[in-house]
Image (tube, rainbow, N blue to C red):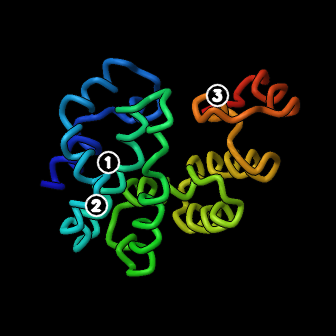
Amino acid sequence: MYDEIITFWFEEVEESQYWQKDEAFDQLIAQRFSAIHQQASQGELYGWRKSAEGRLAEIIVLDQFSRNIYRDSPQSFSNDALALGLAQEAISLGLDKELSAAMRGFLYLPFMHSESAAIHHLAVALYTELGMKSNLQFELRHKAIIDRFGRYPHRNDVLGRASTAEEVAFLQEPGSSF
């Protein structure tokens, strides 16, 4: 079943769709994958973790699909810790080395989404080793925000967190949000 996720994400979806805010794309993911997302959120897809692609599929469901299905809601970040744990374990098992560079980029994405400076230190190493300059540059931009604020200020409103004056000023800068 995980191959449906891999085929959808890497063959059906245009790369530009990964990073755009698109209500129709969000609805498509919700319609096709809400049930799988629910299963992943409850840890029911553990059988997928036996293979590199299966584990990647579960991470995509938890990390990326959460952001699409629950856009602009606190739930969009609710599976981040689980996705990160799965990615960390995949790396410790060497499963990341079985994937293409493009797939590894998504396996490592939970590191980039973390609000932990220690995790971003690891993310820089992972993306450096991966050798995809655009991914590394994007990670460095994320890391700079975490280094400066200790969190992503653009999540504050959605998560009900108060923004500091410095964060408010930062959010008014072009390119401050992802």
Name the image quarter holding residue 173: top right
Q: Earlier in the sequence, mark 2 or mark 3?
A: 2
The residue that appears at 23% across and 67% down in the rendered structure is 46
Could you tell me the amino acid type at mark 1? Val
Q: Which dot, 2 or 1, sits closer to the camera?
A: 2
Contact (CB < 8 A) between labels 2 and 3?
no
User: Where 29 falls versus 27 (above or below)?
Assistant: below
Name the image quarter holding residue 119: bottom right
Q: Which residue is mark 2?
A: 43
Distance from disc 3 to disc 1, alpha carbons, whole Å, reads 24 Å
Q: Which mark is residue 157?
A: 3
Distance from disc 2 to disc 1, alpha carbons, whole Å, reads 12 Å
Q: Which residue is mark 1?
A: 61
Distance from disc 2 to disc 3, alpha carbons, whole Å, reads 28 Å
Of residues 51 and 13, which is closer to you in this image? 51
Could you tell me the amino acid type at mark 2? Gly
Classed neighbour count for the residue bearing mark 1: other residues with Cα under 10 Å, few (<14), some (14–19), many (≥20): many
